[in-house]
Every structure is written in structure tokens, then in C-alpha cells.
Image: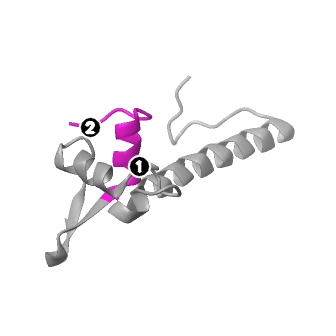
Amino acid sequence: MSLNIHQTLDLNGGEKMYFLAELAKAYGVQKANQDALSKCYTVQELSGPKGRLKCSTKKALQLIKDGKLRYETIGESKGYRVSEKAVREFLGDIQRES
């Protein structure tokens, strides 16, 4: 069953509350995922024992330079910024976009 804006659900009070609670939960999960994926890391935040990748700085830079870890540069400093999305793509948690 697909819904459009002109259709209504034929639910009793309890069913409506359950539906709305599930809808809110799904929205919250989706929002949390979007927020998490928008986080960016420096090379230092990726590396080290507490880093997101828990690897050496040298290894993190090598992953970036080899094109295995997507990145952006910020300003003239040429500092690398790696998004959480790029980290998850590298780890295989989500499919890499072309």
C-alpha cells in the first residue's frame, strides 16, 4: 500500500500512536545517520590508538594518496578532511558512490 498526501490511515487511537512513534523513531535514526555521515576528520583524528581508523598517521596519509580514502582539502593549507561517509565507504559499511 502506498500513501499519498490525500489518503488517510484508518487506524484506531492506539494504532495511530504506535504508527506515529515508529515514524518518529525512523526519522530520528535517519537524522542521526545523516548527522554522523556529515562529520569530518583530520588525518590526526583518523590515526592513533583513539583515532577513527586506529592506524598510523603515515598509513592514513597513504590511504588518502592511493585514492582508497576520499577526502577534501580546506583552504590553502592543503589539510585533508575525510568525511565519516568516506570512512564508512572505505571500511565497506556502505557502498561507494561513483
Report the Cα–Cα distance between label 2 and label 1. Answer: 24 Å
Classed neighbour count for the residue bearing mark 2: other residues with Cα under 10 Å, few (<14), some (14–19), many (≥20): few
In this orientation, which residue lies closer to the viewer: 13 or 61?
61
For disc 2, the marked residue is 97
Q: CB atoms at circles 2 and 1 under 8 Å apart?
A: no
Which quadrant is home to the N terminus?
A: top right
Which quadrant is home to the C terminus?
A: top left
Q: Secondary structure at mark 2?
A: loop
Examine the structure image and report whether residue 92 is included in the region drawn in magenta.
yes
Residue plotted at (20% across, 65% down): 73
Q: Is residue 25 visible?
A: yes
Left or right of residue 17: residue 43: left
Locate residue 37, reporting x and y percent: 43, 52
Classed neighbour count for the residue bearing mark 1: other residues with Cα under 10 Å, few (<14), some (14–19), many (≥20): some
Residue plotted at (18% across, 76% down): 77
Extent of the magenta region: 82-98
Answer with mark 2 or mark 1, whichever residue precedes in sequence.
1
Q: Is residue 39 visible?
A: no
Locate residue 33, reporting x and y percent: 51, 49
Q: Amino acid at mark 1?
A: Cys
Which label belongs to residue 55? 1
In this orientation, which residue lies closer to the viewer: 26 or 50?
50
Locate residue 92, reporting x and y percent: 40, 32
Left or right of residue 69: residue 47: right
Left or right of residue 44: residue 26: right
Examine the structure image and report whether residue 32 is included in the region drawn in magenta.
no
Image quadrant of residue 80?
Answer: bottom left
Locate residue 66, reporting x and y percent: 18, 43
Q: Amino acid at mark 2?
A: Glu
Residue plotted at (30% across, 36% down): 96
